[in-house]
Amino acid sequence: MATNTVTQQMLTTVISDITFSDTGTFNIGNLPPKAVLVDLKVNVTTAFDSVTSDSLAIGYGAAGGVSADDDAFETAVDLQSAGNASLTILNVGQEIDSSINLPLTAKVTSAGGSLSAGAATIVFTYAQK
């Protein structure tokens, strides 16, 4: 006779608002040991306005011997169009092999001029193995 195993996991969601003044790589939360990405959404509420391009990468920072990977979960979200961003979510369901907390990071990259407008909300949902 076959046996079934049911495991329940709590989901945790990190919600972070970013604006055009958030530049470079910065922390938006923390990932516990053995975190597993479940879902990721980015809603651009006000389009970013540099001349050429504005993009967002989402990953994690270095800690305790673990190297940073600033685009582990998303490489280049277009921030120049308002609305729910089109994503190519990476590493969904894969455990981050770490025995310590890691900083969850966002990286805004702009080209072609100074920013004077832009806002977005990142919604990052994960489980812990």
Image (cartoon, grey):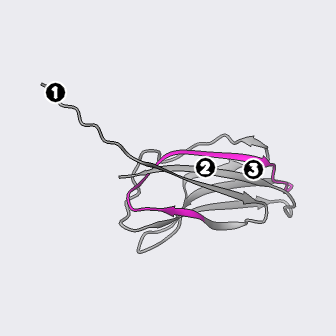
Question: Residue drawn at (51%, 67%), measured in percent from left and top?
Answer: 68
Name the residue beneath numbered marker 3. Answer: 79
Q: Residue at x 81, y 53 (%)?
A: 48
Dot 1 or dot 3: first in sequence order is 1
**Whole-percent x, y for residue 41 in the image:** 62, 45
Q: Circle 1 is placed at which residue position?
A: 2
Q: Amino acid at mark 1?
A: Ala
- Marks 2 and 3 sit apart, C-alpha to C-alpha, by 15 Å
* Outermost top residue: 1
Q: Residues within 10 Å of mark 1 (few under 14, many from 20)?
A: few
Q: Which mark is residue 15?
A: none
SS of the residue at dot 3? loop
Vertical placement of residue 77 versus 112, above or below: above
Residue visible at 67% across and 48% down?
Answer: 77
Q: Are marks 1 and 2 in contact (CB under 8 Å)?
A: no
Query: Which secondary structure lies at badge 2?
Result: strand
SS state under label 1? loop
Q: Does residue 45 belong to the magenta stretch?
A: yes
Position above or below: 90 against 24:
above
Q: Position of residue 85 (x, y in %)?
A: 69, 42
Nearer to us: label 2 or label 3: 2
Q: CA distance from mark 1 to mark 2?
A: 38 Å
Give, as a single range, the part of the protein colored magenta: 28-51
According to the image, label 2 marks what residue? 123
Give the overall secondary structure of the magenta segment. Answer: strand
